[in-house]
Image: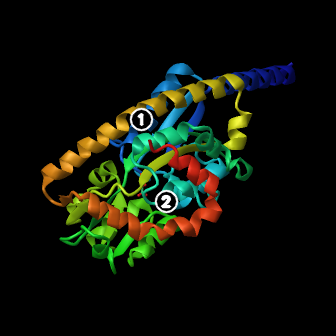
Amino acid sequence: MKLVGAILAGAVALSFSATALAQSPIVIKFSHVVAEATPKGQGALKFKEAAERLLPGKVQVQVFPSSQLFGDAKEMEAVLLGDVQFIAPSLSKFDRYTKKVQLFDLPFLFDDIASVDRFQQSPAGKALLDTMVGKGIKGLGYWHNGMKQLSTNKDKLVRPDDAKGLKFRIQASDVLEAQFRALGANPQKMAFAEVYQALQTGVVDGQENTWSNIYSQKFHEVQKTIAQTNHGVIDYMVITNAKWWDGLPADIRKGLQQAMDEATAHSNKLAEELNQRDRKRIEEAGKAKIQVLSKDDVAAWRKAMEPVWKKFEADIGNDLIQAALKSNQ
Ligand code: LMR
């Protein structure tokens, strides 16, 4: 009798924990490297809100900003290992996984963020989301940040020659390395979380980034000049582990995709506004001077960076470059 009782109690406990397990939400981690008050930071928070609203009790989304969980060096591997489910690296950080996405780093390829958006929504742009599936990475969508500006700790930054001989922090991208070499400058690949200190201590003289990243990281407090070059773009691809994604129950996958679409629309709508807000804040702070360039100055930067295109044309593919150029109207 005792034995039967024990077996019964065990069975009840087992079935109870199985039910609890079936009912406990799937925990989804979203890690990124920027501050919350940026387009990506806001997109990630919107994704959490939408996913938990659309899939009540079924998912719990935990967002980790500012490299708190994983920084640039580890986040891609973490996705592949299943330690985090969503990340949104800058498009400059994929060249170990696909050469095609290097397209976005070509200097002066896109006229503005509207052109970038047109390309991302085109068939050629959408196709890039699937170029890393063979490596286990699935792209779910693009999020905007904005156009890049160039900053240094020098008083003058007007013509390309002003960058000669200076050390610049770059993202882990061979195209960006070539871009600074074309200027006669010294690029140094470095994780985002380390940039402020490197600028402050003079390990590097300058960097390139969007207004929202410059302001939220306080780069303007440790730089003297920010030239409004708009010479490139910092946008993101939101990615997940392809195997994990395909293995989700269909209703969960559908809900998460819908939440992702809402987050994408939200973040993309906010991006330009946040960048303009932060440009103004930098101006008002009065620490770094914003250098507005003439058309002639911009043309000189464009010419100086031109050799980069030839160097990467074969890797990226001329057809893709032409498709991107068509987005400039
Ligand atoms: C960087 O400079 O590393 C940034 O692009 C980081 C980011 O995710 O915006």
Instruction: Give percent across and percent down for residue 76.
Output: 59, 54
Q: Is mark 2 within 8 Å of ligand 1?
A: no
Instruction: Give percent across and percent down for residue 150.
Output: 31, 62
Instruction: Give percent across and percent down for residue 131.
Output: 67, 49
Residue 104: image tag: none
Whether residue 71 is visible to the viewer of this picture, yes or no, is: no
Disc 2 is placed on an element classified as loop
Instruction: Identify the image quadrant of residue 41.
Output: top left
Above-or-below relation of 44 to 288: above
The residue where tag 2 is placed is 106
Judge the density around disc 1: few (<14), some (14-19), many (≥20) Cα neighbours within 10 Å. Answer: many
| Image point (54%, 36%), residue name | 121
The residue where tag 1 is placed is 267
Disc 1 is placed on an element classified as helix
Above-or-below relation of 22 to 116: above
Instruction: Give percent across and percent down for residue 34.
Output: 39, 49
Q: Of 95 and 135, which appears nearest the observer?
A: 95
Q: Of 3 and 231, which appears nearest the observer?
A: 231
Q: Amino acid at mark 1?
A: Ser
| Image point (19%, 47%), residue name | 281
